[in-house]
Amino acid sequence: MTEPGPWWGWGSGGGREPLSPDATAMLRNLVGEASPTAAVEIDDVTLPPPAPLPDSISRAVGAANVLTANRDRVRHAAGMSYPDLVRLRSGRLEDAPDAVVVPDDRDAVVALLDACAREGVAVVPFGGGTSVVGGVDSARESFQRLVSVDLSSLRSVSVDGRALTARLGPGLKGPEAERALAAQGVTLGHFPQSFERATIGGFAATRSAGQASSGYGRFDALVASARLDAPAGELRTRDTPHTAAGPSLRELIVGSEGALGVITEVDVRVRAAPETRRYEGWIVPDFESGAEVVRHLAQEDAVPDVIRVSDRTETRVSLGLSATRGITRRALDAYLGLRRRSDGCIVIAGWEGGREAVARRRALGHRVLRREGAVSLGAGPGRAWHRGRYRGPYLRDELLDLGYMAETLETAHTWSRLQELYRAVRGAIESALASAGTPGLVFCHLSHAYRDGASLYFTFLAPSRPGEEIERWRAVKQSACEAIVSSGGTITHHHGVGRDHRPYMRDEVTELGLEALRAVKERLDPAGIMNPGKLLPS
């Protein structure tokens, strides 16, 4: 297993860099002063002692693959949500797995699940540990013993170049999968912000969406077939391009979040590696007109592979942090002209693929963008965005060190109600922050465009209050979720359900839908050992 940099956060990769003095000053001006905090050392984290595990688990996977050291337990105790990081940084974990189990192959996974089901040991499948909704927390519910199953050894790659499909192991991290595919001239094209650490199995388990999903498709659209090993047995779908044989069982596997079993194999649709990439920046007068631009792009079959519109606040923060780096003088004049009228909102558009196809699609996109009133800022902002596309989680680590609460949430709705949803959720977050006595900063961008609607991705920042971090977060999160539900939006577009969103699943799928999902779980996982406390309300 590869250990990340700072044990409690995202790591020390290329995205981790201190905020500049100007950026820090801007943050304090916009959000207010905060008291810097420091995380404890990993060896100082307090854990409950591990419960002894039955010998059958060691026999299933090999004694050397059952890890009980505190460091291993800490690194698999939580994901990457704001409350997860607060708990980790504080050094006080109320719970952690009793052991981290690392099966060598699928046969070991099957043997492990059989042993755990017989012995009543809860199982939490663990990929990259990037869940931001409590999806890999050590929630025991009624179980006395719990293991985290690290799937990092399941990293096989097999490409069918004629069918343009690939069979991938669930433990492959995003960069590992892309390198292996690139060696055979293809790409999956799935690049979420968690790309550097998240895994193929995690993408499938959470119905992930990547930054280029408007062009390549969400991960669930890329899955051709999958294998789920459940305590009750194997669920496998055929690797055919389509089937009319009843409701899609593949859909039970994709999005199952470890609550039904362990995803041990994923067949995905791939494409020829792109010959060229073109990323650009544009500016529109306001967020609503930006959404209209994207609607026209989507409904006229001209949507770029990457398309996102930042609202005014996100635009202001983004330009402040980058100091308008990469924007030409002429484009900056155009931007400032719009800013004098309405502040403007930045649009990022990106095309990938063969040179001729990119040129053709880009020309069509340009016609729609200009026709709808967007002003080009040139390639500089697009290239800057592409270089920093994975920096967000590293930036959050910096903000936590500086003493700020930094969290994200996302939703989606139809074009007809998207602005209603935007206003409701933004207002709910602002009101919740203000009622706590420390108003913060709320911003949003539109992404993942469809013919009928799009996703909204919100970020909020505020000074944290030592000792009250999780309570304040919960109040804001609850207000935002209630606003989403009352506006008819989805409780999650691509982050999954985990623990945080399960109270709203009834609104999402109805009571009968919950009963149907519970019936499936009872059949595949009769003892209820799989990822307890996630996905389904108790």
Image (cartoon, grey):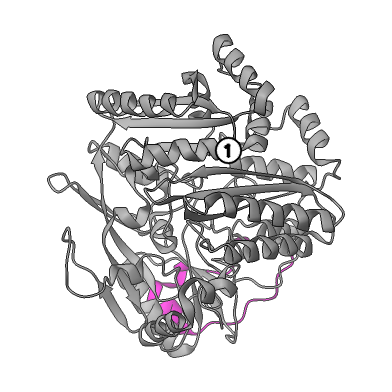
| Residue 70 in sight | no
Front-most of residues 525 and 512: 512
Front-most of residues 463 and 64: 463
Q: Residue 89, located in which quarter of the rendered image?
A: bottom right
Q: Position of residue 116 (x, y in %)?
A: 45, 83
Q: Residue drawn 34% across and 55% down?
A: 155
Whether residue 53 appears in magenta in the rendering, the answer is: yes
Mark 1: secondary structure: helix
Instruction: Give the answer, above or below, for where 168 lies relative to 61.
Output: above
Q: Position of residue 21 (x, y in %)?
A: 78, 26
Whether residue 171 appears in magenta in the rendering, the answer is: no
Q: Position of residue 304 (x, y in %)?
A: 37, 35
| Residue 424 in sight | yes
Q: Which residues are magenta?
A: 46-71
Q: Residue drawn 12% across and 45% down?
A: 162
Quick check: 461 left or right of 231? right
Instruction: Give the answer, above or below, for where 136 lies relative to 29.
Output: below
Quick check: 148 left or right of 117? right
Q: Position of residue 339 (x, y in %)?
A: 66, 23
Residue marked by disc 1? 287
Crowdedness near tag 1: few (<14), some (14–19) or many (≥20) residues, C-alpha within 10 Å: many
Q: Residue 273, located in which quarter of the rendered image?
A: top left
Front-most of residues 500 and 506: 506
